[in-house]
Image (cartoon, rainbow, N blue to C red):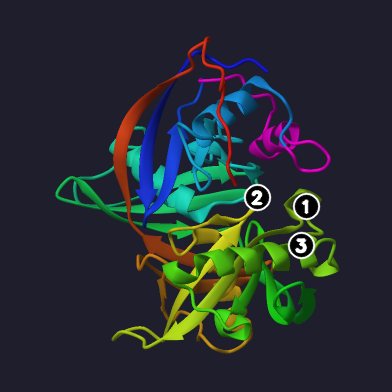
Amino acid sequence: MTVVPTVDCVDYHTAGEPFRIVPAGTVPIAGDSVAERRAIAVQADGTPRPTAMESVRRLLCHEPRGHADMYGGFVVPPDDDGAHLGVLFWHKDGYSTACGHGTIALGAWAVDSGLVVAPEDGEVTVRIDVPSGRVAARVRRAGGQTRAVTFRNVPARTSALEVEVRTADFGEVSLDLAHAGACYAVLSADRLGLAPTPEALPELIRAGRQIRAALEGHPATREPRDPRLSGVYGVLLHQREPAPDGFALALRSVTVFADGQVDRSPCGSGTSALLAVLTERGLLPMGEELHHRSVIGSVFTARVAETVAAGFVTEITGSAHRTGAHRFELDPLDALGTGFVLR
């Protein structure tokens, strides 16, 4: 693998979760569509293929320039003129099929950078092609500043409720499975004797890893419409809270995704999957809002906007903020090369 000697990026965070944006043209990326580009980027077992793009991902995601919970994306051309841009999402273990917090960050970045023209006061919709389909970020502006972004996802659906799996340390666990651009296992943290708090993170990560491993190959984790979207991506563990005025339901949660990564935000596509489960179970009426708080206390508000043949169309609202512009370098004499991962 070769890597370009310098890489310019713009960093945002969405509700505390990082998103490192690599502008289009930084590295060559093969493929004629976003889904095809991701398919080319990964091998049959899901691990990254050794390419120039992969070496840049490692450079930006691994320590010392990144960390085990880093997240980002390569901006690529959209599939057609119906979208403003495309993106390949990445994390420490490879390339994901969906990312709601990244979509929110990209919507803010597209407007803040002038890529998409927006009014000083009002809204504009940024359409983005991601590996799981076309999504939208509705950006709200006031006084020339981006105030909030609403992520409208591909349709979400449940694939199985009350799935029983056995884990090494938590015994029999009952959970629900839902697809929302990626497959999520959704369950109450109470079932494991845990709470979605920072203090419990070591146990939550252990539970997420074990649940994900126990679901390997489960038929309900498959996506028949596109096998590339199959397999559990994240485990969302939630706990009920008193609902603020104007909300039908309030939950606090943590999402453990990939190999033990923790989402600092309430998780965009995970919230979409959660909405599908709550709606199927009759816990959240159609159109009513969920107050969804993350492990660090940041908040998304979310609702099912409509139903379509493919499932529930969800909308998740949060905010994203620029944290910096960076030029990362690789010293040819640096023995650590593109970096390392401690976990």
x then y, percent, for residue 178: 67, 70
| Residue behind mark 1 | 226
Check residue 45 for magenta coloring: yes
Spatial separation of the CA atoms under disc 2 and disc 3: 23 Å
Q: Residues within 10 Å of mark 2 (few under 14, many from 20)?
A: many
Of the image marks 2 and 3, the number of the one nearer the N terminus: 2
Check residue 1 for magenta coloring: no
Secondary structure of the residue carrying numbered label 1: loop
Q: Quadrant of residue 225?
A: bottom right
User: Which residues fall within the magenta stretch?
Assistant: 26-47
Relative to 60, is 320 on the left or the right? left
Instruction: Say the numbered circle drawn on residue 57.
Output: none
Q: Residues within 10 Å of mark 3 (few under 14, many from 20)?
A: some
What amino acid type is highlighted by mark number 3? Ala
Foreground disc of the pair 1, 3: 3
Instruction: Say the numbered circle drawn on residue 213.
Output: 3
- Indicate the quadrant containing the N terminus: top left, top right, bottom left or bottom right: top right
